[in-house]
Image (cartoon, grey):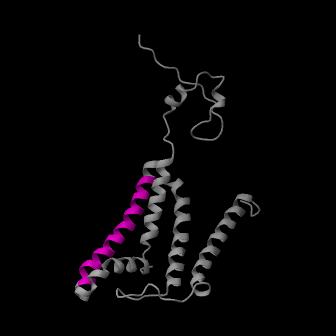
Amino acid sequence: MKISDPLLLARGLVLLVWLLTLVALLKLGDYFLEDNYSLCGPWGCGPSTGSVLAVQLAWTVALLPPLWALTPWLGGLARQRYFALGLLLAGLLGIAFTAAWQQFVWLPEVGSWGQPYLWQRIGYTILTWVEYPMLQLSLAGLLLAANSLQRPRRTGFVDAAAQVPSTESSAAFPSPMTDRPCLSTPVPHRTES
């Protein structure tokens, strides 16, 4: 493979832009966003809003493009759907675990005064727990599931060939496997005798 290969150069450029975007998002909280603590309240106080936003966006940029690029290598649509379901479940289980933890651990510790703030505490914890990208995994699972459901289902070769009226016009119909014209002849139907 030559270094001047256009495909290799394009992939390298895409990787460089992806990495620079990731670094820029992580620096976003330091340079461009105000250092306020608007997430603070009776439910707790954590890092600055700019830092949380920067890390959440960085998780999105870090996860979604590689996952999107990985899906064609998973094989068939069934595997892609299982992968999407796994991502969605990983995110939703993290959210459910966080909600259960706040309900059964945090609420008894703080007493009755924390009851009105339970949902704010759950949201606050999900947003500020940046070590586990619950929201991004859920979003990736939803997007990949929607992508795998929107793809047209391939029909079998016999079904696709039966739709071609004659061999002369078969070159006009694109093959479901490639963008090139289908050069195969149609399979004749069996007639019952």
Could you tell me how many numbered marks the image carries? Answer: 0
Where residue 27 sits in the image (x, y, percent)?
Answer: 60, 83
Where residue 114 sits in the image (x, y, percent)?
Answer: 28, 85
Q: Is residue 118 left or right of residue 6?
A: left
Where residue 82 sits in the image (x, y, percent)?
Answer: 40, 55
The quarter of the picture where residue 85 lies is: bottom left
Residue drawn 47% across the image and 86% down it: 38
Residue drawn 41% across the image and 13% down it: 192
Asked if residue 76 can be seen in this view, the reply is no
Q: Magenta stretch mostly in which secondary structure?
A: helix
Residue drawn 59% across the image and 78% down it: 25
The quarter of the picture where residue 106 lies is: bottom left
Which quadrant is the N terminus positioned in? bottom right
- Note whether 6 is above or below 103 in the view shown: above
Which quadrant is the C terminus positioned in? top left
Is 115 one of the magenta-colored residues? no
Is 87 one of the magenta-colored residues? yes
- Note whether 147 is above or below 92 in the view shown: above
Q: Is residue 40 left or right of residue 21?
A: left
Asked if residue 40 can be seen in this view, the reply is yes
Looking at the picture, tell me which residue is in the foreground, 159 or 55. 55
> What segment is highlighted magenta in the picture?
80-107
